[in-house]
Structures are given as C-alpha cells and as structure tokens.
Image (tube, rainbow, N blue to C red):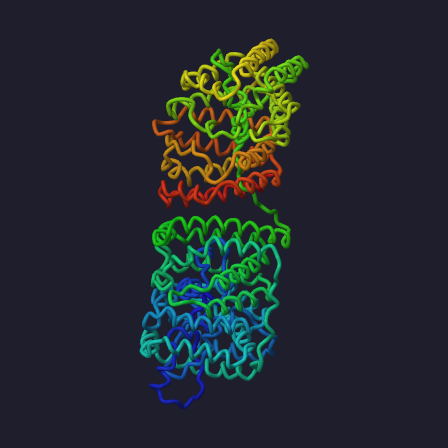
Amino acid sequence: MVLGLKPTCAAKGREKNEDRLAREQALDGHWFQAAFSPVSDPSKYLVWDAAAHKTAGWEWKTIAVGVAVAAACCLQRHLTFVPGPRHAAPVAAAAASMMMAPAAFADEIGDAAKKLGDASYSFAKEVDWNNGIFLQAPGKFQPLEALKAIDKMIEMGAAADPKLLKEAAEAHHKAIGSISGPNGVTSRADWDAVNAALGRVIASVPKAKVMAVYDSVKAITDPGVPAYMKSLVNGPDAEKAYQGFLEFKDVVEKNQVATASAPAVVPSGDKIGEAAKALSDASYPFIKDIDWLSDVYLKPLPGKTAPETLQAIDKMIVMGAKMDGNLLKAAAEAHHKAIGSIDATGVTSAADYEAVNAAIGRLVASVPKSTVMDVYNSMAKVVDSSIPNNMFSKVNPLDAVAAAKGFYTFKDVVENYCCRSCGSCCMLSPVGVAVAVACSVQQHLNFVPGPRHAAPVAAAAASMMMAPAAFADEIGDAAKKLGDASYSFAKEVDWNNGIFLQAPGKFQPLEALKAIDKMIEMGAAADPKLLKEAAEAHHKAIGSISGPNGVTSRADWDAVNAALGRVIASVPKAKVMAVYDSVKAIMDPGVPAYMKSLVNGPDAEKAYQGFLEFKDVVEKNQVATASAPAVVPSGDKIGEAAKALSDASYPFIKDIDWLSDVYLKPLPGKTAPETLQAIDKMIVMGAKMDGNLLKAAAEAHHKAIGSIDATGVTSAADYEAVNAAIGRLVASVPKSTVMDVYNSMAKVVDSSVPNNMFSKVNPLDAVAAAKGFYTFKDVVEASQR
C-alpha cells in the first residue's frame, strides 16, 4: 500500500570499486535519496501515488479516505538526494517500507544515522526541496513499468514491522514541523531522526525485497539523471554525503533480518467487507472509464506552493501513524495482488478492486474520526475545484455519480465502525422530505364524488402537514354515517388506476403550484396532534388494504375519514375554501362526470350525499382562527450546514426543468401496491416529526413558492430556508425511521430514474450538489435524536 512512494533514496552500493560510469548509471537519480532526506514537499511524490492509485482503482476516493502510505509519500520528498556517481543501493525502498516496519534494532543504526548526518546535512541544505523537478518521471514516461516498481515497494512495505513504521511516520511528522529556510529543509536533529527511523525500517525487511525495489526502479530511471541532479548542488558536498550514506547502509545491512514477517490476518464476513462489495459493484464501471495511463497525475496542484501542500501531507502521515499494523499490512498485500491482475489499460480485476476497497475501509476505520477529518479538511484546502471538474469531464458522468453515491454509502459504514472504536459520534442518515406524508395521502384521497359542489377534501392531503385541537366525537359519529353511505362506492373505485397520476385538466404546472401552495397554507394552520393522529390512521389503513382494487377495511375507512374531518375542522373555513377554489381553477369541468362513469352511479350519488352531511358536521366544529405561526430555530449547526448545501446546489436547482411533465410519470416497473409500501414508510416518518418544526417547514415552503420565477425556481434565500427546515424536521425523527424511508424508496426507484434526471442537467452541478448534500446529511444526523 505504498502507493504514494516514489523511490527517492540515496543509493546504496553493492561494490565500492565499481567503474564510475557504471555506478552513475546504477543510481536511481534523485529517487534514491528518498530514504535520507527529511521533508520538503512530499506532494511532489504523489506522482507515483497516482500511478498506484490507478492500479488499485481507488484514487477517486482518496480525498475523503486518506491513504496510509502518506507517511511514505512524505518521505520521498525529503529523501531525494543523489549524492554522487557511485553505485546506488535500493534505499529507495525505505520510502516503501514506511508502509510497515520490523523489530527494534540496537542503537547501532541510530549512531550511524548521526554520522550520516555529519556527512550529509550540508548537502541537504543545498537541495531545493521545493523544486518542481521532483514531480517529473525519472526517465521515459512508462506508467505500467513504473507500476512494477511501485509493486515492489508495496511488497517491501508489507514485509516491515508496523511498530518501526509507526515510529518512522512520527519522525517524519516531527521533521515537517521543523522545516525552515527557502529550500524547505528540516532541522539537523530531525534529519538524523528520520534517517535512523528509515534505517531501522529497511533493516526489518529481507535484503532480497530491498534489492527488488532497487532493480525495478533502476529499470525506469534514465542514466543521465544522477549527473544532472548532482549538478544542482555542490559536488564535494554530494560526494561526502554519498560516502556517509555508504557507511550507513553497511550498518543497516548488518542489522538486516533474514526472513519477512508473517502475512497479515485478513478480516472477513464483516459489514465493511459487505459494504465494499456494494461500493465496488457501483463504482467499477467508473474505474474502467478512467485513463490510468495518462500523465495528468504528474501535474502539480494548481495555485499551491510546496509548503502549503506539505501541510496536507503531514496530516496523512499522522493518520498513517495511527493505523492498525495488521490492517496496514493486509491493505498492502491487497494492493500487491490487485497490481498483479491489472490489464493493459491499468485496471485491476473486479474482485481485487473489491478487496482493496475493503482493506482501505478497515484501515480508515482503525483511525479516530477526527484524524480522518483532518486529512479531508487539509486536502480540501489544496485541491482546487478545477481538478475534480477536469477529471469528471473525462469520464461517463452517470458512472461517476453512481460511484460517488456508492462511496458515500460505504463511507457511512466505515464511519460507523470508526465511531465504535474511537468513541466518536456516528453520523448517518439520508434526508427524507417531510411533505412525503402529504404526498402519500393524495393517492387515496383522489376521488371526485359527482358533478356537484365538491368540498375541498383535497386539502386533507396538505393538512397532513399539521393538525389542530381535539374535537368531540360528533365528527367520529358522522364519519361512521359517511362510511355507511360511501363504503360500497369505495370498493368499486380502482385505487390502483394510473389515472390518479394525471393532471385533472390542462397541464399547467405553475397554476397547479398555486393550488399546492394553498394546501400547504392550510396544513400549516392545523393542529400537529390531530395531524399525527391522521397520519397514524392512514398507516393503519394501508395495513388493511385488500382485494384487486386496493381498498382498506371498513373500520379503517371510517377512522381515516374521522381523522381527516378533525384535521379540516381545525383550520379556518377561509383557508379550506382557498384550497377548493385553487383546485377548481385547474380542474377540467368534464372530470367529475368521467370519474362517476367508472363506478356504479347510484353508489356514487349515495356516497356524495353522505359526504355533504359529513361536511356539515365538520364545518359546525370548525375553528374561527388559525393557530400561531411556528417558532423557527436560528443560529444552529443545521442552519449553517443548510447554507453550505444551498450554495453548493443552487446552480443544480436552476438546471432542472421544473415545468416538465416527467413528475407525472409512474415509477417504471412498479405496481401501485409496491409504491404504497414506500409511501407508508413516509407517513410513519411524518407522524413522528416535531409539530412545531413541521409547521415551520410548511411555512418555509409557502414563502419559497411565493418567490419562484417563470421557470419554477425559488430564490436562493428561500431555497436555503427550506433546506434548513427540512434538515431540522428530519433530525427530529429517529434514525431508524428515516432509514426505513430511504431503504423502501431504494426498492421502488429504478436506476433509470436518477440516470434520466441526471442526463437533463449539468453533470458538474449535480455532483457539486450531491457532495453538498452528503455533508449536510452528516450534520443533520449528528443532531438527530
């Protein structure tokens, strides 16, 4: 898993009396200094990190996860010095060995590191560690050949002792803290400490594995590199440093182990492994879209200096130092296997890709969440938005979105484990929309009794957003009489008919929105307690649905009518009539007669007469004034997060064609009963929402509708207010209830739906919105009861 390592170690000679030219050619250029030059800008070595990422197929997610090998990456930069034209030993492998480390060694290596410091620190101060040359390939650009070298480094790292690797990472972290001067060199004390730590790590690996790194790096290094690199510093200082290095490598070799440590114990059957499979299935098409052989991974981060980038790399080193040693070894072994199965395009097999994802997930879960977030936040500061946008433009956007969605789900599972092991709080919950409750009611209440004055029972759907004070059982008694008159009619209606999805007249989205607005206003005026009871009555009624037409039981029919009657009676008559008038304005006058023709006429007449009597009882119990407005929270974390979400997603909102008739289309391949099960989960969620917050959300929606433009888009300020209101609403509901909604909707929404919607907008805007949403949902989840 030494993905970030580019062999930049000082050369270690096999024979001191080798021909000068041969020795020069054997040097791995600036690469072989990696093992012995404390920190400058390791960012420059991410070049090979990218190559490895390509192979394993997980570069796209390193922003959120953070790679353990960062520790090694950081080494590379400091350790890039080419002392002189002599035979170079594979100390480059030290960088890779930062992936693991062996048993403790006597202080013989520490003493030798001090002598090396005496010989090399003057040279180290002459090297311009901020030079962009360290990003370049050390010869002809050969990504697949370079990958073979990286693979050898990973193998070397996997053979090392985790304890020594941890100490080497900590030494690098400390060395970064003491960097000073225009060239970016660490202090003498930290230079020595890093060299000592790397020496111990290398000594913990059998010589054959170290030499394998050397040979593979040599194969891709141009023979002219060493001489050129030497020309950039004082020649005698480079020679002195190299002589010191040769002595140091002899001490390291003297203490070197003969055999590698045992392979890692790889966990299995855990939730992270299951989640890794889901992630891999969702993202593998995206992985195959990427051009892993591109030289784009050698480009510097735009607009960022080496010291700025180094701060982010330092956070990765700290994270790597906290990782579980066995899991780090397991991840390295998984990457090694994955490299072994890559094809000519640099893509590993699906099985190995899954294994790498599982290994990385377990690694990240072994680190405290705060440490992982430090990596994420520091990377966010140095990675310009142009980078993901540019990378996104090179792949199939639908594949990228599917991969991102899979990643965020995977991240939640990993975080859950991280929280358990570190005592941090978990954050997980897809946001559901409060008004789903109202949506669910609409399907059942879509009946037009007959060609007479139709009372605004449609408002009942909206009123599911709130509800008023309790009423005497006069309404309950009237509901039973209505049941006597209407249940035969109810059984004749085909509630599974797709006609209820159609507009009740000419398609006029903005006019229809006015009617919806009146329903929302009516709902906001209702008593939350009665609304909750109405939602619970609907939930129970769904449970008793039977027969080909999908009708509920007589008892539940009566209970729903009684609950709706009480909700409507809790709202002033003027608001109810406003709903009626607005619905009438968009209703084709021929609709009632047509709907009546689909059932037995006399039964419809009888039901309508019963309804009129019921309406009179409700009106008799109706309140005169609406309840007080909601108390809207402010200054909370959800409000702050809503602003960030709104800023990130408003361009996407403006891309959407809100006036399209696509929203009237049925869910492909799903029956009404199947969809109703998902709606039922929404009703249950709505019934558990905080009444004041539900009212506040309704009022925020009403205000937002008031500011929409000719394209159906609300103002940025109102969009933010709606997001904040929904976030607070969802946070008032138990997480398990929210997840029930999410999971049930996932079963009925075919993948073609989001793909189709995605194809109609700017993909970059959609990705920015999705990223903003997942961050927002984490904040909501953290506030969840």
Quarter of the image holding residue 309? bottom left
Looking at the image, the residue that sits furthest to the bottom is 17
From where the camera sits, is residue 191 visible? Answer: yes
Residue 655 image position (x, y, % from top left): 36, 37
From where the camera sits, is residue 184 visible? Answer: no
Q: Nearer the viewer, residue 616 or 93?
A: 616
Residue 395 image position (x, y, % from top left): 36, 53
651 is higher (above) or lower (below) than 397: above
Q: Nearer the viewer, residue 579 or 630?
A: 579
Q: Nearer the viewer, residue 784 or 337?
A: 337
Left or right: 630 in relation to 385: right
Q: Residue at x 52, y 81 (%)?
A: 207
Q: Nearer the viewer, residue 676 or 641?
A: 676
Residue 156 image position (x, y, % from top left): 51, 74
670 is higher (above) or lower (below) than 212: above
Residue 2 image position (x, y, % from top left): 48, 67
480 is higher (above) or lower (below) than 710: above
Left or right: 52 in relation to 434: left
Q: Residue at x 47, y 43 (%)?
A: 750
Quarter of the image holding residue 223? bottom left
